Image (cartoon, rainbow, N blue to C red):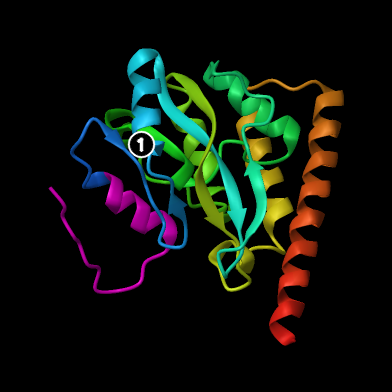
Amino acid sequence: RLSVVYRAELQPPAQNWTQAIQLATGDYTKLFCADDQLDPDITRTQVLLLETNPGSVMAASKRRIIDSQGKIVKKTHGLTGLRTCEDGSTALKKCFLAGTNLLGEPASVLFRTDVIKQVMPWHNLWPYVTDIATYAQVLRVGDLVTSNQVQASFRIATTSWSASLVGQQEQQFADWQSSELDTNFVILSKLQIVRSALNLKVRTLARRLFFIRESRKGDL
């Protein structure tokens, strides 16, 4: 059964996503943003992963990156270094060391509904990390399971919400990571903290260069 719910006013992402999760009634929940795309088998693959791994609370698949016109920019992205099943702390630690959200945007993941509802609302203190910061709360409850298949498309455009945060991304990720490390759920050595900061700078620069290139395309 399909239910369509309209909002009278445009809402910030975290508020909108929280209300969407609260409406979920099935055993599993996927949050799907309008600009992104799902491959036909992604939900079946991720449900099977969760059902065959009782201790898991979240499944993730690789995704491809597309531009505003739907052209593939990168054929496969995400989940680098992650095993088929990772405990929550290890999965989050690998994200810290990579200086990025390895798990992907909401379209790329699937939650057990009872767990994602348990950790609501979606994180909103640092908007750039709304997704991974909320995943971190989910991963405190159980394991992550992953599929090596590319099963979703994440759209990057100069007019997107994430693009509007490009000047704040590095600082917001760093501030969020620091707050997580204070909880001791993940522990990094001093050398690992340096590695994390360097990778964060490299990835932030790469995103900025991409948006600059896309902006110039629009001026042609």
Q: Secondary structure at mark 1?
A: helix
Magenta-drawn stretch contains 78: no
The answer to whether residue 66 of the structure is visible from this angle is: yes
Magenta-drawn stretch contains 18: yes
The answer to whether residue 185 of the structure is visible from this angle is: no
Of residue 92 and residue 109, the one placed in the foreground of this image is 109
Residue at 60% x, 28% y is 92
Determine crowd level at label 1: few under 14, some 14-19, many 20+ residues with C-alpha closer than 10 A.
Answer: many
Residue 104: quarter of image: top right
Of residue 91 and residue 215, the one placed in the foreground of this image is 215
Residue 161: quarter of image: bottom right
Of residue 150 and residue 202, the one placed in the foreground of this image is 150
- In the picture shown, does residue 128 fall above or below 148? below
Magenta range is: 1-21
For disc 1, the marked residue is: 43
The C terminus sits in image quarter? bottom right
Of residue 32 and residue 166, the one placed in the foreground of this image is 32
